[in-house]
Image (cartoon, rainbow, N blue to C red):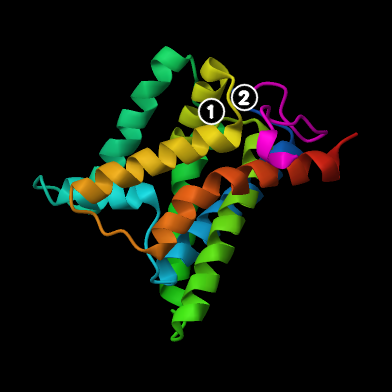
């Protein structure tokens, strides 16, 4: 059952080392493809107008209490999350850097070219699809093993420390972040709740599907 998956699958295109600066083409290809899907999902969630992801809610909440924009706060939060990697013995790789660049570009593409559905039901359906796309993209780029993004690295590190299922660890992180952001004044919508409760199972499903499809 995919909800109980605890390990990142290894497939033929997985990099042997996450800190590999000259990965094989297949590893880099699937890394970029996974990040494109991840960014597409994040962008579609924003476009759905049903609520942003928990980390964006956190950035909004903090920005309301300090004299910095939501974008600047997002950068600070990413740096803060990377600092949390130290006690978890996580190390950044190519994927860590490309994470911020590609996902940011895809979010802008969605905002500029994808219209918001006029019907509320369609907005919710788009939000659900967005969470599933984020999960699939996350599964693909994590399997590439070229370094997780700041938030996924935190998830992987905590999973190794606790030996709890990935779905539970990711869900706990997202719910905690959402709660803090909401307390600070960030805007929470149905899409936020869908992301917070659904991203853990979605990433686990993505990992499970990649492992099944590409297993040797």
Decide if residue 27 is on the left or right side of residue 62.
right
Callout 2 environment at 10 Å: few (<14), some (14 to 19), or many (20+)? many
Label 2 SS: loop
Q: Quadrant of the C terminus?
A: top right
Q: Nearer the viewer, residue 105 or 137?
A: 137
Examine the rendered structure and indicate whether residue 12 appears above or below residue 132.
above
Which residue: 68% across, 34% down?
A: 4
Which quadrant, please, contains the N terminus? top right
214 to the left or right of 189: right
In the rendered image of this protein, does residue 177 appear above or below residue 21? Answer: below
Main secondary structure found in the magenta portion = loop
Bounds of the magenta segment? 1-18
- State yes or no: residue 193 in magenta: no
The residue drawn where x is 63% and y is 36% is 142
Q: Earlier in the sequence, mark 2 or mark 1?
A: 2
Residue under label 2: 18
Q: Are marks 2 and 1 in contact (CB under 8 Å)?
A: yes
Residue 13 in percent (x, y) is at 78, 35
Seen at 49% across and 71% down, the residue is: 124
Q: Is residue 114 visible?
A: no
Residue occupying the far right of the picture: 216
**Tag 1 residue:** 93
Residue 197 visible at all:
yes
Q: Is residue 7 magenta?
A: yes
Camera-side residue: 33 or 74?
74
Whole-angstrom CA distance, mark 2 to mark 1, is 6 Å
């Amino acid at each position: 059952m995919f909800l109980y998956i605890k390990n990142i699958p290894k497939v033929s295109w997985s990099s042997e080392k996450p800190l590999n600066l000259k990965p094989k083409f297949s590893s880099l290809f699937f890394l970029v493809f996974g990040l494109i899907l991840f960014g597409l999902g994040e962008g579609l969630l924003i476009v759905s107008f049903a609520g942003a992801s928990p980390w964006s809610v956190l950035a909004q909440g903090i920005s309301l209490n300090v004299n910095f924009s939501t974008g600047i706060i997002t950068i600070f939060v990413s740096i803060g999350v990377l600092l949390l990697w130290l006690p978890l013995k996580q190390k950044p790789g190519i994927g860590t850097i490309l994470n911020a660049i590609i996902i940011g570009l895809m979010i802008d593409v969605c905002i500029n070219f994808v219209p918001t559905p006029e019907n509320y039901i369609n907005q919710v359906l788009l939000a659900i699809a967005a969470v599933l796309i984020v999960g699939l993209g996350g599964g693909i780029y994590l399997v590439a093993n070229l370094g997780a993004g700041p938030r996924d690295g935190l998830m992987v590190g905590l999973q190794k420390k606790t030996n709890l299922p990935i779905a539970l660890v990711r869900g706990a992180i997202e719910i905690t972040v959402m709660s803090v952001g909401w307390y600070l004044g960030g805007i929470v919508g149905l899409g936020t709740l869908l992301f917070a409760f659904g991203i853990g199972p979605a990433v686990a499903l993505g990992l499970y599907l990649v492992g099944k499809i590409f297993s040797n």
